Image (cartoon, rainbow, N blue to C red):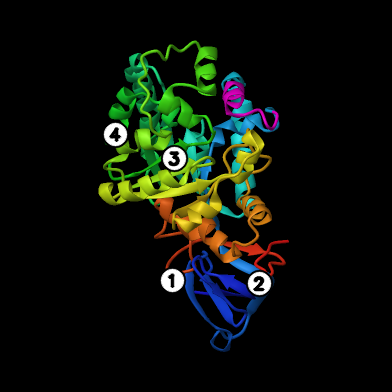
Amino acid sequence: MGFRKFQADAIFTGTKLLGADQVLIMDQHGVVEAIVPVSEAGDEIQYQSGWLSPGFVNAHCHLELSHMKGLIPEGTGLVDFIMSILSLRHFPEDEILQAISDAEAAMIQNGIVAVGDISNNATSFLQKSKNNLSWHTFLEISGFSPQIAPMRFEQGLAAYRQFEPLQGDAFRLSMAAHAPYSVSSALWELMAPYYHGKTTSLHNQETDFEDDFLGYHKGDFTRLYELLKVDTSFYHPTGKSSVQSVAHHFAGAKQVLLVHDTFTKEADLDFIAALSEAQQTQYHFCLCVNANLYINKALPPIELLRQKNCSLVLGTDSLASNHQLSILAEIKTIQANYPQIPLTEILQWATFNGAKALGFENRLGSFEKGKQPGMVWIKEASMPDHSLT
């Protein structure tokens, strides 16, 4: 069998950076054979200026919203953004399916090899069944009124069963609650058996008033439910932050992706650290910085997350809240706002950490023998100052 040999200014393995004296060897199908010194690699080495990295993992996306690109203005805040999403879901099916296909093609072009995708229905089923990418589909369910919990669960379960036949090495499937402010305790209980032993997801503290609603039944989410004509008088506030109000429901889950975390505080991270140990559940914090800027003009507390040794992964959110589905664009935004963070650390979030969070670490995320992680060529990467140009 023939092998392909790649040399660059540097090779990022998924966890560490190697110098220009190393050569990555893959077979014709992209399966890693070895990384060896150039003196042992023989001839026919292909040289690329810049850095080589495993393929990127987009840990949070909404593929089914791809037809909404450019339709929602920036800076509306989350409540008005949600109302816009609800009003724009009813497009002709052929337009939605074409946008889904185009968005997947763009992610492939942008070096993405695996996606954690939020699905509220089975619209993306056909595209995912083509196995162009590795997918972890989070079948997301919401409904804040306890009375509608059985109906919402049955609707979600029907879509879940449509996706079930796709399960395999390149396709994972889990149920997921949408957000603390949009799921009743009754609905949490119905979903619980479906994330036991699996990875699940939760939109977490994306706004500064999420804590107000869960803890004290006040703030802008009261306006959201007034607009939706949903009676929330039944709700008894917890006096705690949103994530502290609901994280006990994750008992039994193997992994949890907390997504956005824009307004997560130190006390919340300490709470999650203790809960993780008690539950034997691994928590990952998914950063979607360009979407945070698009909707709320805010960024998550990345330095605090690093100080607390949180497992970080990267996502793009949807084309309704982002100009592109590009992990490299997310990396550049993080570097622009946090220039002190080494590129190697951010790349690990984008590769190895993401693959582990989605359950693909045996195949993707790092240049290790037997894996087929894809390869990204990052042009003009500067090793001394860890910047991207």
Local crowd size for mark 4, using a 10 Å CA cut-off: few (<14), some (14–19), many (≥20): some
Which residue has dot 1 on it?
369
Dot label at residue 137: 3
Mark-to-mark CA distance, 1 and 3: 27 Å
**Where residue 1 sits: x, y (%)?**
49, 74
| Kind of residue at disc 1 | Lys
Residue 383's disc is 2
**Mark closer to the observer (4, 1):** 4
Q: Are marks 1 and 3 in contact (CB under 8 Å)?
A: no
Q: Give the amino acid type for the residue marked by disc 3 in the picture.
A: Thr
Between marks 4 and 2, how big is the CA–CA gap?
45 Å
Q: Is residue 111 visible?
A: yes
Q: Name the N-terminal-most of marks 4 and 3.
A: 3
Query: What whole-number distance in Å separates the C-alpha atoms at marks 4 and 1?
Result: 37 Å
In the image: residue 346, left or right of residue 150 = right
Above-or-below relation of 226 to 70: above
